[in-house]
Amino acid sequence: MLMKFQLLIAMLTPLFLAAQDPAPAGCKLNKETDPYTRETKLSTGFIFLEGGSVTIDADSKDIDVLFSVEGTDKCYDNNCNAEIFFEGIKSKTSTRNGGTMNCEGLFHFIFRNSKSAPTTLLQRMCT
């Protein structure tokens, strides 16, 4: 009987945790429609992280992952590379800035939006 009671408590614990909030404010998608082209664009808005923020915008052509790095004199152009290390994988991935030259600390990863499966890099970034 005691074991059943402990199992019941363990299963009900996530219901009372604050981390299980079903719709945090930073995770809602914003949907916009361009008045001229009538294309729909989805955006996460800025999600603030330690040392910067990230936003993901998607339309019918591209998926744009924009990292904003805090600090002064963070200039990036289209020749800048980012080396990405993923947890649990020993190899690193290198990719170029997909945006224009800027000194606001903005670094873009731009992926083609297609009906086929997403690229490996996009899948790893999402997980």
Image: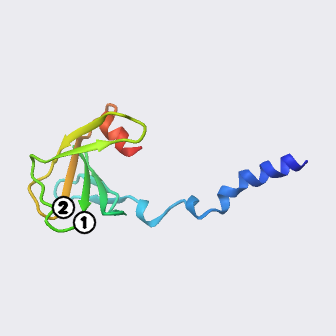
| View extreme (front): residue | 90
- The secondary element bearing badge 2 is classed as loop
Would you place residue 76 above or below residue 127 in this image? below
Would you place residue 61 above or below residue 119 in this image? below
Crowdedness near tag 2: few (<14), some (14–19) or many (≥20) residues, C-alpha within 10 Å: some
Q: Residue at x 58, y 59 (%)?
A: 20
| View extreme (right): residue | 1
Amino acid type of the residue that numbered disc 2 sits on in the rendered structure: Gly
Q: Nearer the viewer, residue 37 or 119?
A: 119
- Residue 121, picture quadrant: top left
Q: How many marks?
A: 2
Q: Residue at x 38, y 45 (%)?
A: 126
- The residue tagged 2 is 105
Q: Residue 28, how many percent across, how many down? A: 42, 60
| View extreme (bottom): residue | 72
- Is tag 1's residue or tag 2's residue first in the polypeptide sequence? 1
Would you place residue 121 above or below residue 54 in this image? above
Q: Which quarter of the rendered picture does the C terminus lie within? A: top left
- The residue tagged 1 is 70
Q: Residue 1, how many percent across, how many down? A: 91, 47
Amino acid type of the residue that numbered disc 1 sits on in the rendered structure: Glu
Q: Residue 44, how many percent across, how many down? A: 35, 58
The numbered dot on residue 99 is none
- Spatial CA distance of label 1 from label 2 is 7 Å
Q: Do tag 1 and tag 2 residues touch (Cβ < 8 Å)?
A: yes
Q: Residue at x 29, y 43 (%)?
A: 84
Q: Nearer the viewer, residue 120 or 28?
A: 120
Q: Residue 55, how many percent across, how many down? A: 30, 57
